Each structure stands twice: as structure tokens, then as C-alpha cells.
Amino acid sequence: MQPGDAPREEPVAIAAEAPLDADAAELQKLGYLQQLRRGLGGFGNFAVSFSVISVLTGAVTLYGHGLRNGGPFEMLAGWPLVTLMTLPVALSLAQLASSYPTAGALYHWSSILGGRGWGFGTAWMNLLGQVAVTAGVDYGLADFLRPVLGLPEERAPTLALFAAILVSHGLLNHLGVRAVELLNLVSAWHHLLGTLVVVAALAFFAPHQPAAFMLTRVTTAPQGYFYGFLIGLLQAQWTYTGYDASAHVTEETVDPARNAPRGIILSVLLSGLAGYALLIAVTLAISDLPAAMAAENPFLFVLHGALGGRLGDAMAWIVIGAMWFCGLSSITSNSRMIFAFARDGGLPGSARLSRVSERFKSPHIAIWVSVLGAFVVALYARAYDAMTALSTIALYASYGMPIIAGLLARRSGTWTRRGPWDLGRFSAATNVLALAWTAFIMVLFVFPLDGVARVGFALFIAALLGAWFGVMRRSFIGPPQTTLETR
């Protein structure tokens, strides 16, 4: 798969209806008809990414991972480090989203700027990452919910809860596009206010360690503290996945060339602030650090120890609600990527996967494939750390590929279609910094993968290369030719 492969021409359907609104007309210039319901405003677009990032999911379900590997210092230094280094990636993706606002997002950007093969690889890496993220979010919710409900510490009840949560997200995304839009708005406020409530409860009602406690460095990693601290960054970096969701829902967003970039950047910035406040508040409320590190769920252990049973349970239910919203948005984003890739013929069964329900205006088959895929990933990657590491590696590979293509196309002068949101003379430096960080974390997070997940990921890459060079290079057309002509 080499950047520069030229796509074959494909006839593009032209809508017979007229007139088109400005957003639908712009989408048609990019080669696609308006099929999905366009009803998201700027806040709604932001809400999707903010909900998928979900500091009350990633920072909470992997709190024990961060605490055991890096101790309180992981929370003090690791979160802001990852936030700072994620911003160049988000800025680079925002620039691309402004130029090419389609549901295919990263796959389209890579195809347009780097060629069909580059786009094909990006799409599959993004799909794997998104399915694994959904699995991680909903399995994490099931694992968090199980002790709250008093269920035994066994895999069977966790899987049953996981399946029920997945089905609830699938049904809502299939049957209630308008309801999902409303729930995304509720989700954003739930995350913002919920984080504030948890932080306030810990600040006012919990006993506190002195500020110097945050400098405590302790690890269970046999390789030593430096290694443990780096591996502990998975807590923050996995949280910072899925902000490309704002780009995946551009065909459902009003004025997407402006609102999608804002959604991507604001979701990262606000998540950074909210997540840091949460982690500092929880960590300062730890009364017994060794006991917290040894607990089955360190976050719940700290909440109940600091706030007592009733108030601790109330805070836990706020977190559970946020996790549920996160999984809902994750299925939304994942299904749009499947739909967009399928309408260009990139998936087995593309004709079915690209169907949109006439009644509900949702890509219903793609939605249920997202649900099934997440369930399979959770069955395969039994370790939660492996699930989250796999999704982080795959997603950041799919983020890096269009950034590489865009950097090269900009330098060669072949990328001339610029959206209203552009990095200008800071573009190259931002892209290089984003790519350096992406390469670093992709190598780093191979280590938390268990042997089965490593072999599975390697086989996935081998199968992807085999499919491209064996079949798809000759048959896959890619995005419509008119997309390339608008550069």
C-alpha cells in the first residue's frame, strides 16, 4: 500500500432534487448524496467526541492501571503530559476534517491525499480501533457495574451485563436517531456536571492527603518505576481516543467544515481540564495507598473509603451513567465509519452494510455489525488492559496515516482544497509533532498486549496486506473521483 496509488474513476450519482441546502450541496461536490439526517449543531458535534473521550470512563476504568504502574505521580504528571501531546494530533485531524467533511473521515482523507491503498489501510485500522474501543468501554462499564449490583467476581455475569449494554446501545442507534442526538447533548452535560459533582463531593466531604502526596512514586512493574510510569500512560492515552467521532458525524452536522474541527479540539481541551481535576481529587482522597493499589476496583475503593457507602454509591452511579453514554456515542461513530467505507465497496457485504433505514435514517446494519464486532473483541482479548491497548494502537495508526498523507501532499503542493479551519504556516511543525507522539505510543503500548492479542494483531496486519495486494488493489475503487477533482 503506497501513497500515490490513483483511484479508478467511478460514476457519481447526482441528486435530481433541487435546490439543495449548502451543506448537502457541498457534500455532493465531494461525491455523495445526503442520506443521513443532518441535525447536529456545533454543541451536538462536540458532544459526540466529548462523550466518546469520556473522562468518567477511561480515567476511571483504568485508574487502577495508572495507580499500580505509576502511583500518585502518574496522575500528577502523566495526564497533563498525554493531554499536551495529544493536542497536535487533534489539531492535525481538525484541519483535515475542515477540508473534507464526510462520514468516511480518516479513510477519505488518506485516500484523497495518499491514494486508494493508503485509504484502505487507514479504514481497516480505524475500524479495528473503534470496535476495540466500544468493547473496552462497554466491557469496562459491565465490570464496574457488577460489584455495584453485588454480582460475583466471575466472567459470566460480566459478559451477560456487557451483552445487555451493547444491545441497548444498538437498539437506540437503530431506532432513535433523534433520541441519540438528544442523548448526546444530555451526555455532554452529564459528563461536565457529573465530573464537577464527584470532584466537589471529594473536595468537601473526604479526608485529604497533603499536596506532597501527589509526588509519591510507586510501581508494581518488575521492570522499575520509569517503565511503570510509561506503561501507566495508557490510562490517559486510551481516554484520549475517539475524538475523531466529530469527523465521522460531519454528514449529520450543520456547517461541518467549521463545527467538526471545533468539536475535535474542544473535546480534547475540556476533557483535559475535567479529567485532571477528577484525578487529583480522587488521588488526594486515598487513605491507604497499598490497599487501594491491591483493590479489585481502586476507584470504587477510594470513593467508598472517602465518602462512605451511600454517598460513594451515588458518585459511582454518576460514573456508570457517563460510561453508558460513552458506549452509546462509540457505537454511533463506529457505525458511521462502517457505513462510509461500505458505500465505497471496501467491506465484505458492502451493499448491505451501506444501507440506510428509510424509516429511521440510520445505517442500521452497520450499527449491529458494530455491536457484534465489539462482543467478539471482548471474547478474544480477555485482559482489559489488552483491549484498551489494542484499541489505542489501532486508532492512533489510523490517525497517523492521514496526517502523513496530508503532510506529504501539502509539501508537494497537491493538497490545495483547504477548509475554513487551517493551521497555515504551523501545519508542518504540528503534523511532525503529532506523528512523533503517535509513533512513540504505538510502540509503547505493544507491551500491555497479552500473547494472544499480539498474535491476533499481527495476523490482522498480515491479512490486511494480503487482502490489498491479493484482491482489493484491483477491485477497490475508493472514494468518488469527483472528490479528488475538488482538491
Image (tube, grey):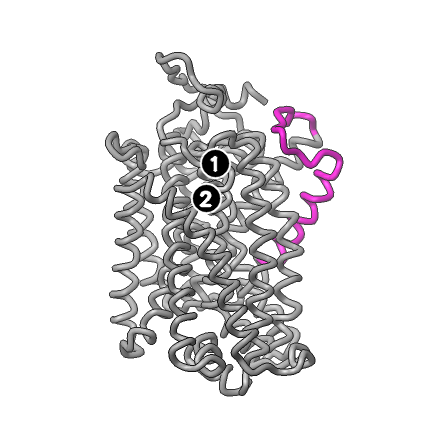
Residue 120, labelled with which disc?
none
Q: Position of residue 299 (x, y in %)?
A: 47, 74
Q: Nearer the viewer, residue 135 or 41?
A: 41
The span shown in magenta is 412-441
First along the sequence among labels 1 and 2: 1
Where residue 212 appears, as percent x and y from the top left, is: 69, 80
Magenta stretch holds residue 14: no
- As displayed, is residue 283 above or below residue 186? below
Q: CA distance from mark 1 to mark 2?
A: 39 Å
Helix, strand or loop status at disc 1: loop
Which residue shows up at 43% across the image and 62% down it?
A: 387
Give the image quarter of residue 384.
Answer: bottom left
Disc 2 crowd, CA 10 A, few/some/many (<14, 14-19, 20+) = some
Tell me: residue 89, above or below residue 381: above
Q: Hey, what amino acid is under mark 2?
A: Leu
In the picture, measured across the screen, residue 43 lies left or right of residue 384, that is right
Callout 1 crowding tier (Cα within 10 Å): few <14, some 14–19, many ≥20? some
User: How far across and down, in percent of the image, does residue 409 sit?
Assistant: 65, 31
Query: Three-letter amino acid code at disc 1?
Result: Gly
User: Residue at horizontal 58%, vertical 47%?
Assistant: 266
Q: Which mark is residue 41?
A: 1
Question: Which residue is the extreme one toward the front?
Answer: 204
Which residue is at a point 51% across and 44% down the rendered structure image? 46
Residue 310 versus residue 246: which sits nearer the camera?
Answer: 310
Instruction: List the residue tagged with mark 2.
Output: 465
Main SS class of the magenta portion in the image = helix
